[in-house]
Image (cartoon, rainbow, N blue to C red):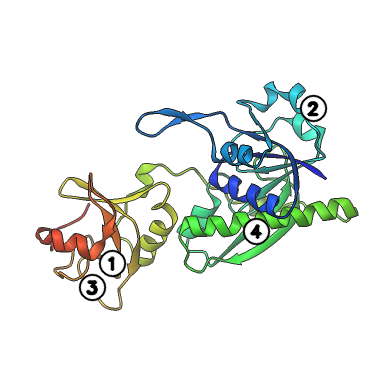
Amino acid sequence: MKVLFLGSSTFSKIVLEKMLDENVEVSAIITQPDKRAGRGKKLLPTEVNVFGKEKGVEVFTFDKIRNHMEEIKKIDYDLAVVASFGQILPQDFLDFKLTINVHPSLLPKYRGPSPIQTAIMNGDLQTGVTIMKVAKEVDSGDIILQKTVDINGQYYKELEQRLASLGGEMIVEVIKQIENRTIKFTPQNHDDATFTHKFNKEDGKLDFSLQANNIVNKTRALSEEVGCFIVLNDRIIKIGKVQDVSGQFSCQPNTILNYKKAFIIGCADGAVEILTCQAPSGKMVQGRDFINGHNNILGEKVL
């Protein structure tokens, strides 16, 4: 069975890589056009674009699918697989060939653009991957296959890798179902649907008036992509990794503990240790090394 793959993100690239590892025949790829990024604002292709060309797969960069339907209809494929593509697909595309989506949540929970981050931030113990038929409303289509995974305290990127790899494996299962004519479509319970939103830089600010688990979960969810930070003496300090140390330390919320061996900040129910952090124009360092070089901040308040 020949597959047309649509994807643009790191998650997409991992799904595609796993599909190719599992010998899925990908006849072509559609990804987002090059975008300006970095300090030089250079035009850069998506990871999917680069990876697809490395693997010798034909790659198309279409700004809007609805403007390229005649070209798409000339592509030799039986099934379209979508994974974090970044565009709403028009109805005439969905009507042309069966189109399925790899979504990293247990739908109908966490529809929308940030299901992995939201699950981590909410402190969920489990999440999963859903393969569904694409419908007009975002992430509302019938469920074909669903699998659950334990989050195990992972940070975003590691969990993203696990879920994307699983998604690629699940596509193989669905292809076999199609070939064997055993595929089944189960409608979602739309009354149970919950929705996610795209996070921005301001969402990454850590609030140490909250409980430790809220701070840890937010850092696990956002530090690697969106970025987490505190404001200290009018300087923005980026936060990499943290841990709950409430059983060992406690001090006033938002206050840096007067302790020179570790970077400890008080919170509502105890304390959180900053394991890695980055000062402006600096590099990411161990929290204890940061404190060694900045003893003057002991006892200070963070904003």
Q: Earlier in the sequence, mark 3 or mark 1?
A: 3
Residue most extreme to the left: 296
Q: Is residue 219 left or right of residue 9?
A: left
Mark 2 surroundings within 10 Å by alpha-carbon count, few (fewer than 14), some (14 through 19), many (20 or more): few
Q: Are marks 4 and 1 in contact (CB under 8 Å)?
A: no
| Amino acid under disc 4 | Leu
Mark 1, Cα crowd under 10 Å, few <14 / some 14-19 / many 20+, is many
Nearer the camera: disc 2 or disc 1: 2
Please report contact status of discs 2 and 1: CB closer than 8 Å, yes or no. no
For disc 3, the marked residue is 250
Q: Mark 1 or mark 4, which is nearer the start of the sequence?
A: 4
Residue 196 horizontal/vertical position (percent): 53, 47
State how far apart marks 2 and 4 are (Cα): 29 Å
Left or right of 265? Residue 244 is right
Q: Name the residue that disc number 2 marks.
A: 73
Residue 40, placed above or below residue 14: above
Where disc 2 sits, the SS reads loop
- N-terminal of the pair, mark 3 or mark 4, is 4
Mark 1, secondary structure of its residue: strand
Label 3: which secondary element: loop
Q: Amino acid at mark 3?
A: Ser
* Amino acid identity at mark 1: Glu
Q: Give the amino acid at mark 2.
A: Lys
Residue at image x 84%, y 55%?
A: 177
**Residue 244: x and y, percent?**
34, 70
Residue under label 1: 273
- Give the residue number, with chain letter if any, for mark 4: 166
Of tags 3 and 1, the one toward the viewer is 1
Q: Nearer the viewer, mark 2 or mark 3?
A: 2
Residue 42 lies in what quarter of the image?
Answer: top left
